[in-house]
Amino acid sequence: MALRYDGKYKVGDKVRVRKWENIEKDKKYEDGVYHRLGSYSVVLCNEYKIKPFEGKVGTIAAIDEYGYRIKEDENREVLWIDEFFEGYAFGYGEKIKISNDEVSWVEAYYVGYNDGVEFPYAVVLLEDKEVKPAEAELPKFKISVARYAKPLKERHTVILDNEEYGLLEDDFNKLKKFLKTHILKN
């Protein structure tokens, strides 16, 4: 079985590409090469390859032993690694999970992202979870920031005939149930 890059994203995840100047500031970056775990990796990039993707959303299309491939990089200009992404890309108002310690997570609504700061995710937290339309009072909310964010529903990567598919939790559980009842029983 081939080795796979041990990154945090799965096939189908939407990610936002970092600004070049923030990648360049990374302590692992030296002369167009990223240094990982005491040895130089094959991750080569430069300003001209990253600039066209800066701030844009990419979709993880494949994962190999060195990193990711994104659908939007049709010419395969960059071998993408976690450090090249700000994080997951969310739509304005999308319900997500946030954390400042990657241990305890709470649900919030995504408002925006500021690359290069300690708490980059801007979110809205609703204090009243259930609000009936007939109520005269508007729901209470507060604006907050967070260090980490992830989708409400995480993906699982399934490989069939060397093709990778990113499945959401519900679809992954349906597939598991089907396999257990129809195939793995025999």
Image (tube, helix red, strand yellow):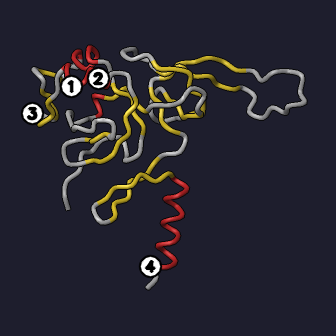
The answer to the question of whether label 2 and label 1 lie on touching residues, with beta carbons closer than 8 A, is: yes
Cα separation between marks 3 and 2: 25 Å
Instruction: Residue 15 in the image: state x and y as whole percent.
Output: 39, 33
Within-10-Å neighbours for mark 3: few <14, some 14–19, many 20+: few
Nearer the camera: disc 1 or disc 3: 1
Quadrant in the picture for the C terminus: bottom left
On screen, residue 11 versus residue 168, left or right, reads left
Please report the residue visible at 52 percent of the width from the left and 35 percent of the height from the top. 104
Q: Is residue 81 left or right of residue 173?
A: left
Return the mark for residue 126.
none
Mark number, residue 49? 1
Residue type indicated by callout 1: Lys
Q: Secondary structure at mark 4?
A: helix
* Disc on the earlier residue, 1 or 3: 3
The mark that comes first in sequence, 3 or 2, is: 3
Q: Which residue ends up furthest to the bottom in the rendered image?
A: 186
Relative depth, front residue between 65 and 14: 14
Is 115 rendered above or below residue 65? above
Q: Earlier in the sequence, mark 3 or mark 4?
A: 3
Classify mark 2: helix, strand or loop.
helix
Query: Label 1: how many residues lie within 10 Å, few (<14), some (14-19) or many (20+)?
Result: some
Question: Which residue type does callout 4 highlight?
Answer: Ile
Q: Residue at left 9%, top 35%? A: 39
Residue 183 - label: 4
**Do the residues bearing badges 2 and 4 touch, measured as CB atoms within 8 Å?**
no
Q: How far separated are the C-alphas under marks 2 and 1?
A: 7 Å
Tag 2: Cα neighbours inside 10 Å, few (<14), some, or many (≥20)?
few
Residue under label 3, please give it: 40
Marks 3,2: beta carbons within 8 A: no
Q: Which amino acid is tagged 3?
A: Tyr
Q: Earlier in the sequence, mark 4 or mark 1?
A: 1
Outermost residue, front side: 75
